[in-house]
Amino acid sequence: MPADASIVSALSELHRYGAVDGVCLLYQDFIVANHLPISDKKANLIGATVTEMCDGYQAVGRNITEFYFGYDQCQLFVFCEGAVRLVIILESEADLDQVGQGARAFLAENRSVLKALSDADLTQRIKVPAKEPERKESAPEEEPEKEEPSVSVAPVAEPVEKPDEWIVFREKLHQLLSRVLGSGQSSRLIDRVVKEHGYGKRNPLQVDFESIGNALVEKVPNKSKRRGLQSLLTELYKHYR
Amino acid sequence: MNSLTPDIAKAQTTMFRIAGDRVASSATAEDAENFREEIDYLHYFVVRLGEDLGMHTVDYGAFIEGESRVGFRFNKSHGVQTSEINGIVSTAKMPMKQLLEELL
């Protein structure tokens, strides 16, 4: 769908608040209109992060309508109405409430057009790419980065890498996590946590499965769902002890 | 917490503090812990978006959920940002600017 001209025009109206540096309209994970003063690549990254953030809250039934983030050199606002997300970058001195009012008015005045986005042809929208290139799970053999100590050490019983075990475990983790988060978000979250555990392109060792699973649970933004997930994972861990 | 924890959400205005050692304090220990978890989750996205924008430091984060306004702000000492966080959850319909000023 070519972004509706009236939407684009209304969107650019937001610039009349002097301190607005740029705006971007997202529908689900598609960029409908992008007027951000940054490269398309960076705009896509921001779109992907905003989508992940909003989807994460919505997946657990939370309806957060406005986010305000302040940084050393700018401010970023995100306004959410279901699958429609309006991203605004402002200068540090911008009047938060004035811009907020303008953004809310934009969403209210264009509600019918924005609603129609769901029925529109998706092919002409720009798909927000994944934040990081997806690692291929099916290529575990390639491990040139593995840091082998130059001095031989006594082999330890456990830490032999078991790529197959990880692939199976990861799939089960993904299935469980997808019950409370979106599938794509679950996948990205697992990749991120694995990375945080110090595994670059390597598959995690079995001794770290539990720690990775527990770290994932902590990232679910809902206490009761965390508890439910934790008990399911505890069952899963039993197969890997 | 399908919305904010009931104990937090029903409060008119509750202040929070997360010290440099990540210990959270508020009127009740449970509220404080819930707030810390809430902020930890949001902070991840605040940082990621800041990185995408090429920013160096996070000053504040806030959101509106139903009737609740939630905000956090990093403390500054002599103009330098610390890892301490002041937080607020309020059901008062105050402007966002005012909410964030409460955290200074």
Image (spheres, grey):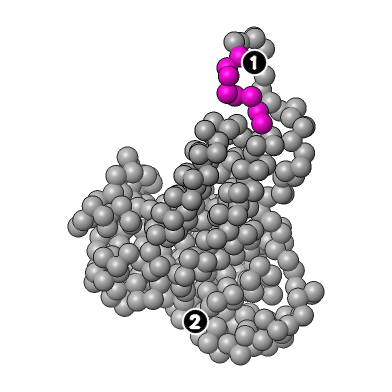
Above or below, B11 relative to A191: below
Marks 2 and 1 in Cβ contact (< 8 Å): no
Above or below, A96 relative to A170: below
Q: Residue furthest right?
A: A123
Label 2 to label 1: alpha-carbon separation: 58 Å
- What is the x, y in percent for residue A68? 46, 66
Q: Nearer the N terminus, badge 2 or badge 1?
A: 2
Instruction: Please give the residue where the numbered disc 1 appears in the rendered image.
Output: A149
- What is the x, y in percent for residue B43? 45, 54
At x 50%, y 39%, the residue is A238
Q: Give the magenta part as a residue range.
A: A155-162
Queried whether the magenta region covers residue A156, the answer comes back as yes
Label 2 environment density (alpha carbons within 10 Å; few <14, some 14–19, many ≥20):
some
At x 66%, y 23%, the residue is A147
Queried whether the magenta region covers residue A136, the answer comes back as no
Look at the numbered disc 2 and give the secondary structure of its residue. Answer: helix
Report the side of A212 relative to B7 (left or right): right
Above or below, A181 relative to A158: below
Closest to the observer, A217 or A151: A217
At x 56%, y 66%, the residue is A55
Q: Amino acid at mark 1?
A: Pro
Above or below, A87 relative to A139: below
Instruction: Please give the residue where the numbered disc 2 appears in the rendered image.
Output: A104
Look at the numbered disc 1 and give the secondary structure of its residue. Answer: loop
- What is the x, y in percent for residue A233? 49, 47
Label 1 environment density (alpha carbons within 10 Å; few <14, some 14–19, many ≥20):
few
**Quarter assignment of residue A182:** bottom right
Q: Amino acid at mark 2?
A: Arg
Residue B71 seen in the figure: yes
- What is the x, y in percent for residue A70? 46, 60
Disc nearest the viewer among 2 and 1? 1
**Quarter assignment of residue A165:** top right
